[in-house]
Every structure is written in C-alpha cells, then in structure tokens.
Image (cartoon, grey):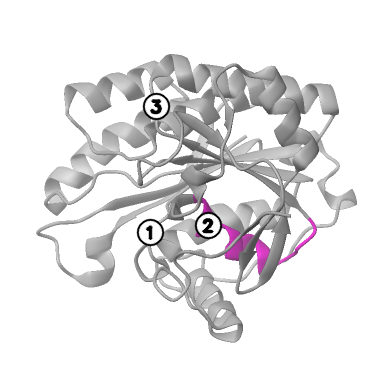
Amino acid sequence: MMIRKPTVAGLFYDNNPEDLKKTIENCFTHELGPGKIPTLATHNENSSKDCKIYGAIAPHAGYTYSGPVAAHAYYQLVEKGFPETFIILCPNHTGMGTGVSIFYEGSWETPLGNIKIDEKFSKELIKTSEIIDPDFSAHLKEHSCEVHLPFLQYFSNDFKIVPITMWMQDITSSEEVAKGIVKVAKSLKTSISIIASTDLTHYAPYEIATKQDDLILGEIAKMDENELLEDIENFNISMCGYGPTIATIKATRELGANKCNILKYATSGNISGDLSSVVGYCSGIFI
C-alpha cells in the first residue's frame, strides 16, 4: 500500500505530535484566529441542510504565518461536522506529475497519524474524468495538501481524503475537475466537502497586496469564477491556487452553494511586521 510520507513536517508545522497539537490550538486562539477551539459536531447535529458547508478556501503556508487565518475555515468545518470525504484541490508548485493528478490509493501520514484515501471515490473519478490522471509523483513533494491535514486530524481521524493537484489551472480544466467531482459524489452518494488550497498575492508591498486581494475576495464571495480569472489576468495577480478555487466555486454551486462567506483575511506582514513584501491569506466557506 502506498503511504505518502510528510514532506514539510518540521518546516511548515511541528514534527512532534504534542507540539503540533499545541500549535494548532494556538492558531485557533491567536488574535488573528477565531478566538477559541471548536467542538466537532456529531452526524445528527449536522443533519440539517441549512448548516451544510459544501466547500472551503484556506491557505497553505507555514502555520506561523497562515495558521490563524486557516483556523477560521476549520472552525466552521468542525462546528458543522465532518463529511465522509474531503476533496482537497491544490496548485502544483513542484512541476512534477501530470496536468491534473490524483493520489488515488493508500494513505497519507502526518505526525498525528495516517489518513486513508477514499479509493472508491478516487478510482471512480479517474474513470469519469478525461482530465484527472492517476499519478503519485505530483504529490510526493507538494505541500499544499499536506498542511491542511493536521488541522482536521486534531479533531478526528474518521474521514477520508481525495488529494488532487492542478498544474493546469485554466477555466476549462477547472470546470472538468468540478464536473467529475460532482458526478461521482452524486453517483456514490458520498458526503463531501471540497477544500480549495491557495494563498493570494505573493511577495508584494502590503498596500498593493491588500488592494489586489480585495478584488479577489470580492469575486470569490460572489462565486464569480469568470471575473476572478479576469482580475488575475488583468492585474497579473500571483494567486497560486486560482484553478482549485475556480473548480471549488463551480462544484459547490452545482452541489447547492450560492455564496462564499469570507471569514478572515490577513497577510504574512500582519505576523512578521514586515510590510515591504507580503503574502495574502484568506479563509472562507461555501454555503
């Protein structure tokens, strides 16, 4: 069985399990975080469609910088109760693997234990979609899925994941990924939540980054993927996971979402104090 070993444990987050748990707790209680640690809802408590979270958007930098912002999305996911499977859509930073690559069997290891791949969902997705390839190599050194897992594991190990990396992030590819996810979720009747893994503007002065990111957040809140892509192209915005975000907008809309609540925005400069070159982070939920 394929076990994907952690790549950024000890770099982006703690390698020691107890230290990692404390860091996650600190992300929730941090002044930029939600302020408290949530309690995982039971399945019965999550039976109402009104409280369903179809997807989320969360950053994937080191916990020191983006963890408190990410905690806002995870607070809501925890409070509403976990689905059977999280579909985690990520950019491909390494250039390894195919255009759209799925890690389709085995498990992922973190300091908090192993998480099983939803192999049934993954293999059905490969059969259904012409664009999603079975490919481990794209995931071996990629951090943008891995960093989300300890946030979920802190509260439960009773879920599975489907990690997908997107090197091709154009509108057509994103739409094909979304269509495949929706079709398989409905066919298998699997309860899912999709996580769009992305940071926003990279390495720009604070004033420029926040202005650019304000445009992005407005389009995401409206779930307007076409305007989002237009803003990125027109203003040359260095958002790394726009394809996963577009795919999440499209898929969650098809599943029933009609808006994205932006929960928190901050930059690396809010943590470091260096406003000369910052990276933007946001958290939101599609409901």
Say which quarter of the image contains residue 188: top right
Disc 1: CA contacts within 10 A as few (<14), some (14-19) or many (>=20)? many
Which callout, 2 or 1, points at the residue further toward the start of the chain? 1
Residue range (magenta): 145-158
Question: Could you give the CA–CA distance between mark 1 and mark 3, rounded to whole angstroms?
Answer: 20 Å
Q: Nearer the viewer, residue 287 or 24?
A: 24
Q: Nearer the viewer, residue 16 or 30?
A: 16
Question: Could you give the CA–CA distance between mark 2 and mark 1, rounded to whole angstroms?
Answer: 10 Å
Please report the residue visible at 73 percent of the width from the left and 41 percent of the height from the top: 51
Dot 2 falls on a residue whose secondary structure is helix
Dot 3 falls on a residue whose secondary structure is loop
Give residue 61's mark: 1
Please report the residue visible at 58 percent of the width from the left and 71 percent of the height from the top: 36
**Residue beneath disc 3:** 169
Dot 1 falls on a residue whose secondary structure is loop
**Residue beneath disc 2:** 146
